[in-house]
Amino acid sequence: MQNRVLLVEDDDELRELLARYLTNQGFTVREAANGRDGLALALGQHCDIVVLDIMLPDISGLEVLRELRAETHLPVVLLTARGDETDRIVGFEVGADDYIPKPCNPRELVARLQALLRRIAWDQKTEVNAARTYGDIRVEPGHRRIFQNDEVLDLTATEYEVLQVLLAHAGSVVRKTDLMQWALGRRLEAYDRTLDMHISNLRKKLGNDDPPRIETVRGLGYSYRVPA
């Protein structure tokens, strides 16, 4: 499993603290103190995953994320202000894979990064030709791609994970607690809307079906409906 992390954070003290902790946990860390430098490093393929602060001195982390998503599906974990739900919602709409509020616990950050990288590494070991079809949807696990009507869907790493879990259980209800664990690699916490945001984004990308392909089963979770 590759573990090159790009840490984009303008707070020197916090960046150095997180960089030391990540290094001690076996990560190779590159650092950037502003958005432009971070964007250049990310687009230069100098990392496997990005930890990106939203509040940066030159351009915002959300703008960095927008420019990244125009070029790459590199997984991105946002650092957000605690309690600022608006930034988190916009971050997911732009294409973030996960978030962690500041001041963050370095141990939790490591756990989030490891879980995301493990899921990507597992899929990359899957046989390239082991494609699966669900109506007009085709999943190619080895390439981490999902097609709709032979057009590749523009998904983030986490959106891919959520959708492929739902597809694997098409027609059945996947509980939110299970989907959170299987797709994001962590427990569902109270008031955590991360999963809801990913589902909302997936519905938009799959098209405005009525009823929607991803149905909400009140009090339980979600179910993927294969169109007739």
Image: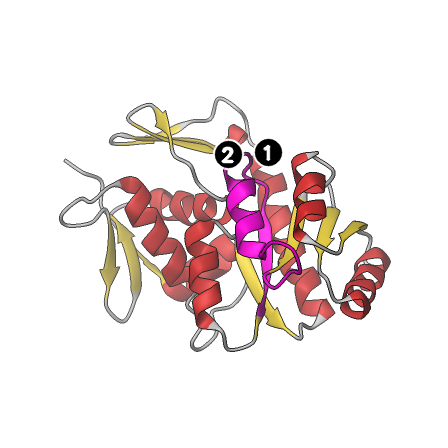
Q: Are marks 2 and 1 in contact (CB under 8 Å)?
A: yes
Which circle marks residue 144 in the picture? 2
Point out the stretch of residues depicted in magenta. 54-80
The residues tagged by marks 2 and 1 sit, at their Cα atoms, a distance apart of 7 Å
When asked about the image quadrant of residue 18, the answer is bottom right
Q: Which residue is mark 1?
A: 124
When asked about the image quadrant of residue 170, the answer is top left
Q: Relative to 24, is 41 above or below?
A: above
Left/right of residue 10 with respect to residue 202 in the rendered view: right
- Asked whether residue 175 is in view, the answer is yes
Q: Where's residue 88, x and y in %?
A: 48, 64
Residue 153 or residue 137, whichever sits in front: 153
Q: Where's residue 25, x and y in %?
A: 81, 58
Report if residue 64 lies within the magenta region: yes
Report if residue 13 lies within the magenta region: no
Q: Relative to 39, is 33 above or below?
A: below
Q: Where's residue 204, x and y in %?
A: 29, 47
